Amino acid sequence: MTAASGRAPTGRRPGVPLAKAAVPRLSRRHVSRARLLAALDEAADGQVTLVSAPAGYGKTLLLAEWAALHPELTAWVSLDEDDNNDRRFWSAVLSAFAACAAVPSDNALHAIAVPGRPSRDPEFLAAVVDAVGAVPRPVRLVLDDVHELIAPDPLHGMASFMRNRPPSLHLVLSGRTDPPLSLARMRLAGELHEIRAAGLRFSPAEASAMLAAADVPARPDQVRLLVEETEGWAAGLRLAALSLRETDDPDRFLSGFVGSGRAVSDYLFGEILSRLTPDVRELLGAVSVCDRLSAPLAATLSGRDDAGTVLDSLEHETSLVLSTGEDRRWYRVHPLLRSHLQADLQRQRPDLIRRLHGRAAAWFAATGQPLSAIVHARQSDDRDLVTSVLCRHATSLVADGEHAAVREALEWLGDAHLDGEPWLALVAALVAIESGAIAAADNHLVQATAAWPPEPPPDLVALRGLVRSRRALVAGDPSAAPPAAGEIGAEDAADLGLGPMAMVHRSVGLLAEGRRDEARDIAETALGQARQQHRGYLAALGLITLGSIAAADGDYSRMTTLATAADAELADQAWRATIGAAWSATMRAYGALLRADPVTCLDLTSADTPADASGGQHSDQLVALRAALRGAALLDVGRGDEALTALRDARTAAAGLRGPAEIPATVALFEHRAAELQGRTDLARTVLGWAEAQLGPVGEVLLLRAWRMAGLGRTRAAAEALAGMFDRDVPVVLPWALVEGRVLACGLALRADVRPQARRELDHALALSDSMEVLRPLATGPPDVIDLLTRHLGSFGERESTALRVLETRIALGPDTRPVSLTDRERAVLSMLPTQRSLEEIALDLTVSRSTVKTHVRALYGKLGVNTRRDAVVTARRRGILVPDAPGLSGEPG
């Protein structure tokens, strides 16, 4: 009987269990994943959808939920090994169609007879295609567990059916492996819509929902860890949920999830590993010691020349192995499976694990991958191998910023091992220096000296020279050792992989001598070489050096940009634990403060530093500068007492500093200004004396004297000191100090009522602020200067935008929270304003003239931003300048 003429009873075919054509039921704990349901719906008309992933990825439940959304359109077949019988397979398919509500009762799908070899019967296959095409509505056919089909006949019949399928049919194939069909051709033709393991992985949000549905409480960090360990594998998450519900210590369970989770191990073996041949399981065990591996490395570990072919086959057939990288020549075993394999090896063959790690270390070292070589050498428990890798590659690893790996390997070897190895002792000193641990570095230098050979090789001498130079530079003591160029040549440094580091040292030395152009040229060359060699850490050091040069030029915007770029060059935890990162953060804090952004400055100077993580300590230069910046920022946000404490600490650290004067000059300007604003005239005098002794005849000392004279009301003397500062014969250490000088000069001109001169000084200040990106001196300037700037808005030409930025920044700072700079006489007058005394009586009490009192009152009004005696008192009390215990007032000064 042919398919065209034979008829069978309508409904389920004989010998086909009801369950085969039934859509699996979803449990009440099922977690819906809308993104995957949408992905299934995205298949274009006529496409075949392939859902392919290893066991336990949730393929069946996903398709069951999708089918349940439109059950009337879905025909479902749950395949098993019995379906390799061709007649049974097609009987199941026809039964599924017959059970679909969208198929009318008079459709031929209910009656088509199944011949002896249906997949080899063209008439039968054509009749099925025609009958499906005659269904008035689009229908879906889901073939679940299609990997069970391995017999030639049903595979042949399914291939024919796929080629000739009607456009109204959405065919869905789901299995653990790709079926042996013409998928590549369909993919090229755009006929295949694929959802694979990567798409089926649970996200942290989905995993959290799964655990919640299973009544398993879990913190967000526990969920993240679980997703990382399982890579979103649904079965692993479900098994973990079962165990978590029963454990009293979730954190302990998660830490040993794979190795101790019996349910997981049973599932992995029973559902995945048991289906592989023993030789493939042995290969997977051997390669499990590596997180990633290439075909040659797999061959080295397993001893099989065809290891790459096996891994490639496992990727395509099981998704247990994934290829990565641009050319996809690196492989990864699924992490949960890999952890299981490692735990199994550790239990049964710990000696083999050590040998495998040794093979991996040798392979990575020979192929120029020293970081991986060190990791595996340590796990091999072979000290000679670790020593060999470090001696050969440690300086290159330092250049790459891999200090933690080198430090951990050296600590693993122990100090006793370093005592007889001067090379390793010098390497230990270098990585200690990079974290700011100068004392530890000095101990390692002593070790190197004690083991120094009578005739040291040139590379050992070169390394010692570089370490000494680096130690002197980081410690802020350039006289402690000759500069890098004095003991180590560029060629020697290049042989060590540290050529750009030596060039950076030379650049810093030239900057200290004031030879900025030469310093810049060498630093830019160092940066170029570091990037050409792909040495991210050395490139970051080059950027920081260029940032220092930009600061010396007064280009604070470029300084900040370069410091930010240094962080981007090596944006990882390893970089943040170095002295370079501490300088980068400090430069960015400096730039923020000068832009009048004290909040950002405080954030950057309050952050953890390398010393916190490594037990090291910063140089006095860095300590002093960070404390000075923090103190100035605290002053700007109204925390005056804390500001003075931080600035005192900065001066203590800066006392007696060798090297450039920028840091003591910065400390002196910040602390003197804070002392004046807090009414600490005694402290201001102390700071001025300290600066005179520390800095000598420089513009910053003249500025401090001018501030002091202005505070005493000696306007003429202050103006004369400033004139000396503006004289080109007097060196100015800090370019931004000139802005402070011009702001003070403007205020002095206003006091003297010389308005044209005040306007000229304001223009100078705006021009300097604009060119340097320095807003703080104006934004925190005295009220009378700000009043002048406000009155002249619209007349500043190309500086108009800078003037507006100054005012916007001043408003953002909240000027009422900042201290007010008052002279001693102004404070005395202010203290009497709450009383009922007239100006004549106040003048009599202070033994000055009435006109002098009126001058002080006008100055008070300007500094407090008020116009009446009552407002002056109210504002002074609100801002903490007056103790609020005096009686109320009426009236104003006459």
Image (spheres, rainbow, N blue to C red):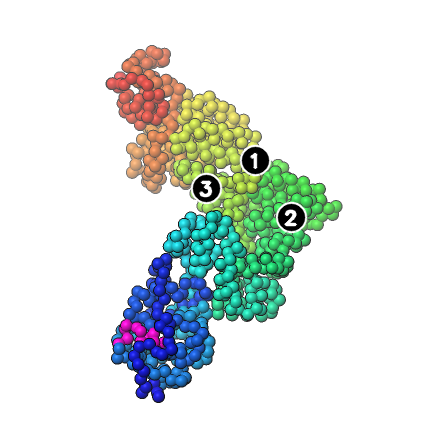
Q: Please, what is the three-letter code of the amino acid marked with disc 3? A: Arg
- Which of the 4 quarters of the picture holds residue 71? bottom left
**Secondary structure under badge 3?**
helix
Q: The N terminus appears in which quarter of the rendering?
A: bottom left
Residue beneath disc 3: 588
Q: Please, what is the three-letter code of the amino acid marked with disc 2? A: Leu
Q: Residue at x 34, y 65 (%)?
A: 66
Which x, y percent locates residue 705? 46, 25
Local crowd size for mark 2, using a 10 Å CA cut-off: few (<14), some (14–19), many (≥20): some
Q: As rendered, which of 43 and 212 lies closer to the eye?
A: 212
Q: Residue at x 49, y 62 (%)?
A: 267
Q: Residue 99 magenta-drawn?
A: yes
Give the mark nearer the N terminus: 1 vs 2.
2
Q: Residue 151 magenta-drawn?
A: no
Q: Residue at x 40, y 65 (%)?
A: 59
Q: Are marks 1 and 2 in contact (CB under 8 Å)?
A: no
Which x, y percent locates residue 734? 48, 35
2 vs 3, front mark: 2
What is the magenta range? Answer: 92-104
Q: CA distance from mark 2 to mark 3?
A: 38 Å
Q: Is residue 693 visible?
A: yes
Q: Is most of the magenta stretch helix, strand or loop?
A: helix
Local crowd size for mark 1, using a 10 Å CA cut-off: few (<14), some (14–19), many (≥20): some
542 up-or-down from 156: above or below: above
Q: Residue furthest right?
A: 454
Residue beneath disc 1: 659
Give the mark nearer the N terminus: 2 vs 3.
2
Residue beneath disc 2: 413
1 vs 2, front mark: 2
Q: CA distance from mark 3 to mark 1?
A: 22 Å
Q: Is residue 855 visible?
A: no
